[in-house]
Image (spheres, rainbow, N blue to C red):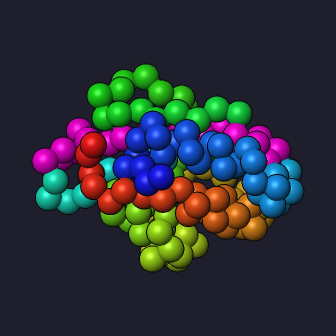
Amino acid sequence: MAHIFPSDGWVDSLADILNHDERYAHVARGWEGDLLFEIRPDEGTKDGEDGVTRVYLDLWHGQCRKAAFYPASAKDFPRPTFIMGALRADFVRILTGALDPMQAMLTRRLQVIGNMGYVLRNVPVVLDFVRCCRKVEIDLRTDA
């Protein structure tokens, strides 16, 4: 089933995939760190600067302990180890395979805040996480 990105449905589907994917459990068995996607509205959309939505994932030793979607109106959300920020269109391009996540980081289409040394030492974990994200089919509409 396709889900609008970002949404509660997309987040719930991703958490389920992460918690049932044996390959991810193995590859990420040493990962310790939660993350927050900060999804900025695409340029020219009605949401403007105030339309930042967020996806929180608490990833720990190959499992997703908590997953939540925070709409733009949310003022209280977790402060994670890592923040990944991008325009919605760039996130969608990464999640559909049109944009390589490492290339997105290098070209600053995807900004990462946190310990980059840890991320770079764990590139296989990052890439397998993205593989799991790509299993969630995205409905390309911007709203329900």
Magenta includes 49? Answer: yes
Give the x, y percent position of residue 12: 55, 39
Q: Quick one: which residue is furthest to the front in this view?
A: 1
Q: Is residue 52 visible?
A: yes
x 63%, y 42%: residue? 15
- In the rendered view, tell whether residue 124 sits above or below residue 87: below
x 48%, y 46%: residue? 10
Q: Is residue 120 visible?
A: no
* Side of 22 where 98 appears, left or right: left
Identify which residue, 91 or 144, lies in the foreground.
144
Give the x, y percent position of residue 47: 18, 44
x 32%, y 50%: residue? 40
State which quadrant residue 66 falls in.
Answer: top right
Q: Quadrant of the C terminus?
A: top left
Identify the magenta region: 46-64
Give the x, y percent position of residue 89: 33, 63
Magenta includes 60? Answer: yes
